[in-house]
Image (cartoon, rainbow, N blue to C red):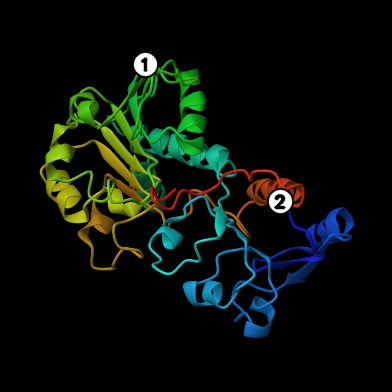
Amino acid sequence: MNTYYPIHILVAVPCPPSIRDRFSTQFGSQCHFTFINSSQTIPESLLRHTDVIIGEPDEPDLLKAPRLKWLQLTWAGADKYARMKRLPSHLTITNASGAFGIIISEYVIGTIIALYRSFSVYSHHQAAHTWLPSDNCGTIYKKTVLILGTGDIGSSLAHRLKAFDTSIIGFRRHPNHRALPDFDEVIGSDQLDLKLKTADIVVGCLPNTSETIGLFDEKRLRLMKKEALLINVGRGSLIKNDALLHVLKEGHLKGVALDVSEIEPLPKASPLWDLPNVFITPHIAGPSFGGNTDVEQAIWNLCFKNIERFLAGQVLNHIVDLRQGY
C-alpha cells in the first residue's frame, strides 16, 4: 500500500468534464490528477512525478517515469507492451478487458447476418435502383460455431449466439476441465484442425502472441468447410492475407468479415477489397473513446474500481501477463 499522498495520476486519454469531476470528488483527498490529450507530448517534468498513468504511453515515456508503479490501459489488447524490451520490472500493467465484449459481439452477429443474407449484394442493387432478389440465403440457427478465444469477447459472443440454438466450441491455449458457461465444448491446439472441419462459423477473438501469429495459414483455411464463414475481430496477425486470398479466389469459404488485418491499414492495392464475399472494416468492432458512450463508461468504471483497489493495497483487476501477451 502507498504510504505517501497525494498519488500523482496522469490521465492521458480524452476525459470529459463529468469524469474529471468524478475523479476529484471520489479520490481528491488522496490523488492529484493531471489531464492531457493522448495526442500531446507528455512533458518529462510531469513524467518524473507520475505514479500512475491511464492511457497508452510509448516506451520512451515509461522510461522517463521513475516513480511509475501502475499503467492502466484503455485497450483490451496489450501486445504493444508485450513487444517492449525495456519495460520497468516493477511496473504493473492492467487492461480494459470486460469493456468490449457486448459491442464486439453485436458486430460479429451483425456481420454473420449480413453475410448470410447477402446485404452487400442488396446494397449494390439499391445503388443501381435494381429490384432483384438473391437466391443465396443462410441462417445462424443450429449452426456450429468455433470461437477462437474464450475470454471476455469470446464468452460474451458465445452467450449471445446461444439464442440461435447454436453449438458453441471454444478454443483456448490451455483448456481445463472447468466448464465455461455457454460453451458446449472447449478445445486446445491438439483438436483445432479436427474442429475446423466441422464448424459452420469460425470467429477469431485471439490476442497477438507468438502462438497466434499466422495460426490460420493456407492449410488451416482449407480445412474449413467450403461454405463456412470466417470472422476476425481479434488481431490481424491471426490470418495470413495471401493465404486467405488464395482460398477465396478458388471459391473456398462462403464469406469473410475482417475488422483487423495482417497489415493495418489494409493496403489500397490489396485484392481483398474487391472480393464480393469479403466485408472489411477499419478496426472498429470495439470502439472506445469517441466511438460509443456505453463502452467509454465501462472503461472509466474499470479505471475507478482499480484506483480504489490500488489505494487500498489490493490486487488490481485485469493484470496483464506480458509473457503471454494478454
Instruction: Report the residue at 55% width, 76% height from top.
Output: 61
Q: Earlier in the sequence, mark 2 or mark 1?
A: 1
- Which residue shows up at 58% across the image and 49% down it? 96
| Near-viewer residue (304 or 107) | 304
Q: Is residue 77 visible?
A: yes
**303 w.r.t. 47: above or below:** above
Q: Three-letter amino acid code at disc 2?
A: Phe
Q: Residue at x 43, y 15 (%)?
A: 165
Q: Position of residue 69 (x, y in %)?
A: 62, 62
Query: Are the residues at dot 2 and dot 1 in contact (C-beta closer than 8 Å)?
Result: no
Pick the residue in front: 158 or 52.
52
- Which one is nearer the viewer's eye here, 123 or 72? 72
Cα gap from disc 2 to disc 1, whole angstroms: 45 Å
The residue where tag 2 is placed is 310
Q: Which residue is mark 1?
A: 142
Residue 46: give x, y in percent of width and height.
69, 79
- Helix, strand or loop status at disc 2: helix
Q: Secondary structure at mark 1?
A: loop
Residue 196 visible here:
no
Counting every numbered tag in the picture gives: 2
Q: Quadrant of residue 116?
A: top left
Label 1 neighbour load within 10 Å: few <14, some 14-19, many 20+: some
Whether residue 195 is situated above or below residue 217 in the rendered picture: above
Q: Which is more toward the observer, 31 or 280?
A: 31
320 up-or-down from 71: above or below: above
Q: Residue at x 66, y 73 (%)?
A: 37
Which numbered disc covers residue 222? none
Q: Nearer the viewer, mark 2 or mark 1?
A: 2
Amino acid type, callout 1: Lys
Q: Position of residue 50 (x, y in %)?
A: 68, 71
Q: Residues within 10 Å of mark 2 (few under 14, many from 20)?
A: some
